Amino acid sequence: MPTQSVGHSRAGNIPVDKEYQAASMNILTIAYISVLLKASYLPE
């Protein structure tokens, strides 16, 4: 884990990285759900 975080964060351990990952995952999840909802509403 520490070897991976070195490349992403500049000043060592930055808590913003985890918050950014969580926010990006939430955005991807919302986008995925919205696509599924749009696909379910469209007639096939």
Image (cartoon, grey):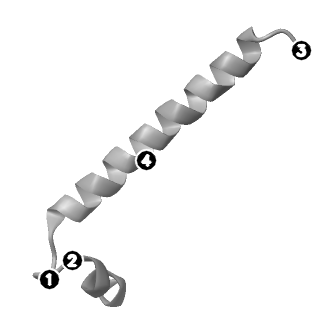
Q: Residues within 10 Å of mark 2 (few under 14, many from 20)?
A: few
Residue corresponding to mark 2:
9
Q: Which amino acid does label 4 sit on?
A: Met
Query: Real-space Cα distance between discs 2 and 3?
Result: 46 Å
Q: SS at mark 3?
A: loop
Question: What x and y, as percent, mark residue 3?
Answer: 33, 90
- Of circles 3 and 4, the one toward us is 3
Which structural element holds mark 1?
A: loop
Compared with residue 23, is residue 15 higher up or lower down, i.e. above or below? below
Q: Position of residue 27 (x, y in %)?
A: 42, 39
Mark 3 or 1: the one toward you: 3
Q: Is residue 42 left or right of residue 26?
A: right
| Residue type at numbered disc 2 | Ser
Name the quarter where the C terminus is drawn.
top right
The amino acid sitting under disc 3 is: Glu
From what the image shows, is residue 32 above or below residue 34? below
Q: Residue 44 carries which label?
A: 3
Q: First in sequence: mark 4 or mark 1?
A: 1
Q: Is residue 11 above or below residue 39?
A: below
Q: Which mark is residue 40?
A: none
Circle 4 residue: 25
